[in-house]
Amino acid sequence: MIANTLLLAASAAAIALPPPTVDFQALLQTQDAPQPLFQHTSHQSSHVADDDDEDPIPVIIWHGLGDASNADGLSEVADLIDHVHPGTYVHIISANGNADDRSASFFGDLNTQIDLVCKTLASDPILSTAPAVDAMGFSQGGQFLRGYIERCNEPKVRNFVTFGSQHNGITQFERCKSATDFICHAANALLKSSTVWSDYVQTHLIPAQYYRDKNDFDNYLEHSHFLADINNERKTKNSTYKENLSKLENFVMIVFEDDQAVIPKESGWFASVNETESNRTVTKLQDRPIYKEDWIGLRQLDEKGSLKFLEVDGEHMQLNNTDLKKLFKSYFGPERSKKSPVEPTVDEIVDVLGEWFVEKLDL
């Protein structure tokens, strides 16, 4: 059914596509299918945390479009986290409960997937008993994890890091790399058609569920099954979303300077972009109602210094170990209150300095 929908939309846009008998699920296994956006999944560290005060907080990861939780690249990331903070328990999220969940990154109902993830994390014997967890989302996994935080947050998230995510949605699927990239062309045609707002597409095609068109905003508000909800854009606001997200210690949003996969790339910072052939206007988060009226707690996070906007060189999901290690050292690891020494009092400092002068001057 989803294949037929894609084909009809593409035909309407006069895009040359394969015969109607093509199986889009099967295409995921071919070289024409979009490749994983993160090349660097479910991997869980072999180190199991004990009851020591210095135990690092567990880390949960949600991968991006075209990837799978059992991919080698994500296992390497988990190993790197464990290298920086030995003993870290790393849980790679599977959207459908299977290790090979690549198809679930393209097809499915996001609300159903997040419900499953909420139940899975809450029942994990290590995650559910930890004081908190840190969370890392790659590409679309970033807004999906934000949905988890806003709706469930049990276990609660301490620090949240997203890489090239689409927090303010996308205006098209991606820039297709070739004329034979059939899935890409079909998905773009579908997103530009009225079919994108049908209940069927909004519960079966993952990218459609975070598609946001300013020129068709009324339909977006009425029919979006995911993004309009977690961004609290409708008239009736869900106060739990703001309450949960504002409890984060840090929300770190990383955008790639040369990102061609996320359109617009500034969506990773909740910015809004109005683009025409002759002009491109970016409205930053702080100038938008979602911030000014604090619909989901972003202003509250910003005012306490917990909202971080970072940009790195390179294209979408081009990361290096040096940058990752810096992030892991800064935002992952043991609880800071236990990891950092207690600041000395003024009297203690005076006493130490006094003893030093006495010793040096031989008084």
Image (cartoon, grey):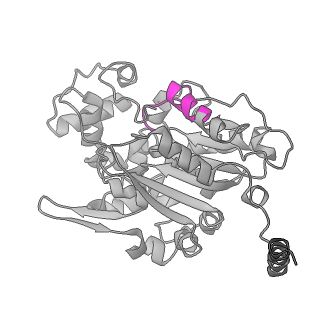
Q: Quadrant of the N terminus?
A: top left
Q: In which quarter of the image is the C terminus?
A: bottom right
Residue 126 or residue 102, whichever sits in front: 126
Give how far across and how far down residue 140 sits, in percent: 45, 45
User: Can see residue 314?
Assistant: yes
Q: Is 16 placed above or below 206 here? A: above
Residue placed at 42% from the left, 45% from the top?
202
Residue placed at 40% from the left, 73% from the top?
288
Q: Which residue lies furthest to the left in this view?
A: 278
Q: Is 303 placed above or below 93 here? A: below
Q: Residue furthest front?
A: 362
Residue placed at 44% from the left, 58% from the top?
310
Q: In which quarter of the image is residue 189?
A: top left
Magenta highlight on residue 360:
no
In the shown orientation, is residue 335 left or right of residue 238? right
In the shown orientation, is residue 116 left or right of residue 340? left
Give the magenta-colored segment's residue range. Answer: 64-79
